[in-house]
């Protein structure tokens, strides 16, 4: 599968500079970082969750794990859970399963970014396939997605919901 046209069109229509990087097939953010020989801190991943009944994308460094308790507090919801694969297919129909890009706004989903990502000058992320990534300045990404910010990731194991 190629990078979804809606992503390319969105970036191009806003004159945002970005670099497309093709890599060997990878299924996790850490695998992508290893394949491209970059630090997992520069590579980010989008984690699709549901806060109460609303889908949300949490963007965190690939080297981190989502802290469910902190994200639940940031979202001010009582229940937080991972979105099942069956829902991901419907929400991101032009993307490979498990290759969700952080542009939730293009899919009608709110985007929350961990401050560890927001502190980066540039980010590298999955572009809807297991073989393609995009590299761009974080400031450009933020202008396009208008994310909410919080602290909800950690280097250790993920905390239970």
Image (cartoon, helix red, strand yellow):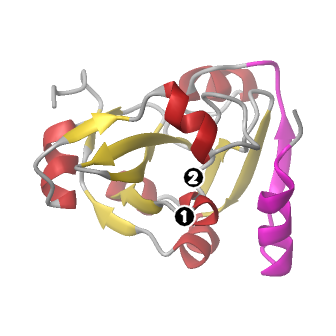
Magenta-colored span: 3-25
Residue in the foreground of this view, choosing between 155 and 75: 75
The residue where tag 2 is placed is 102
- N-terminal-most mark, 1 or 2: 2
Reply yes or no: does residue 26 show up in magenta: no
Reply yes or no: does residue 15 show up in magenta: yes
Pointer 1: residues within 10 angstroms few (<14), some, or many (20+)?
few
Pointer 2: residues within 10 angstroms few (<14), some, or many (20+)?
many
The residue where tag 1 is placed is 108
Pinpoint residue 11: horizontal percent, then vertical percent.
78, 69
Separation of residues labelled 1 and 2 (CA atoms): 12 Å
Pinpoint residue 118: horizontal percent, then vertical percent.
43, 62
Q: Nearer the viewer, mark 1 or mark 2?
A: 1
Location of the N terminus (image quadrant): top right
Pinpoint residue 82: horizontal percent, then vertical percent.
35, 33
User: Which residue is located at x 82 percent, y 19 percent?
Assistant: 24
């Amino acid at each position: 599968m190629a990078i979804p046209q809606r992503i390319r069109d969105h970036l191009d229509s806003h004159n945002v500079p970005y670099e497309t990087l093709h890599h060997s097939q990878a299924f996790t953010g850490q695998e992508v970082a290893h394949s491209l020989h970059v630090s997992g801190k520069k590579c980010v991943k989008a984690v699709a969750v549901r806060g109460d009944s609303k889908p949300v994308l949490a963007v965190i460094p690939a080297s981190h794990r989502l802290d469910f308790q902190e994200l639940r507090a940031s979202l001010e919801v009582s229940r937080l859970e991972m979105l099942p694969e069956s829902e991901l297919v419907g929400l991101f129909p032009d993307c490979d399963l498990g290759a969700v890009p952080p542009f939730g706004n293009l899919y009608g989903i709110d985007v929350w970014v961990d401050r560890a990502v927001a502190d980066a000058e540039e980010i590298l992320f999955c572009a809807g396939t297991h073989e393609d990534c995009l590299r761009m300045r974080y400031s450009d990404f933020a202008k396009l997605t208008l994310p909410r910010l919080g602290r909800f990731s950690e280097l250790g194991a993920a905390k239970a919901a």
